[in-house]
Amino acid sequence: MPAGFTTSFAERLNGMSAMQVKEADDGDRVRPGLVLLAPGGERHMRVYRSGGEYRVKLVKAERVSGHCPSVDVLFRSIATDVGRNAAAALLTGMGEDGAAGLLEIRRAGGRTLAQDEQSSVVFGMPAAAWERGGAEELVPLNEIPTRLLKYIAVKE
């Protein structure tokens, strides 16, 4: 998403969601009930462990597979620092960004899903994840939140 768009997109989602939604800031703590959107533009979002919590790091870097921010960069950091405690889903979108990173999360012991073709506007990203073995299963969009919450509840 382009710079500037993600701020208004996060605000719009925040008004529609039961959870707080905001554009991520460097150092934000990942916590229950908070949805962090990667800012559009020139920085990748990564998650890292800091003591007993997870935090966001925004890193200015080159595009990865033509994207900045890149889902693969985010998911790879989650695979490395969150590992088996992670639960992730790849949603509708063009291309393959996120497919390799989702596979890394799965290989690290995390739980992974991808949006099914019937509920996707564009099945490119979820299809790529499925074909690579990164997604355990394809799930309709409306079932993904419940499934992710179930996965993290089992690990607590």
Image: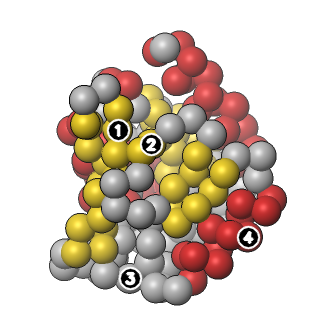
| Residue type highlighted by circle 2 | Val
Q: CA distance from mark 1 to mark 4?
A: 25 Å
Q: Is residue 87 above or below residue 128?
A: above
The answer to which of 153 and 106 lies nearer the viewer is: 153
Give the image location of residue 125, x and y in percent.
47, 61
Q: Residue at 66% x, 51% y: name it.
A: 20
Of pointers 1 and 2, the one earlier in the residue sequence: 2
Of pointers 4 and 2, the one earlier in the residue sequence: 4
Report the side of 80 relative to 45 (left or right): left
Identify the secondary structure beneath mark 1: strand
Report the residue marked by disc 2. 30
Q: Which mark is residue 12?
A: 4
Q: Residue at 35% x, 38% y: name it.
A: 54
Q: Residue at 19% x, 75% y: name it.
A: 61
Q: Residue at 46% x, 62% y: name it.
A: 24
The answer to which of 107 and 48 lies nearer the viewer is: 48
The answer to whether residue 45 shows anywhere in this view is no
Q: Which mark is residue 41?
A: 3
Q: Do labels 1 and 2 touch, CB within 8 Å? A: yes
Identify the secondary structure beneath mark 3: loop
The answer to which of 131 and 54 lies nearer the viewer is: 54
Q: Is residue 20 above or below residue 152?
A: below
Of pointers 1 and 4, the one earlier in the residue sequence: 4
Q: CA distance from mark 2 to mark 3?
A: 21 Å
Give the image location of residue 21, x and y in percent.
63, 57
Give the image location of residue 135, x and y in percent.
44, 39
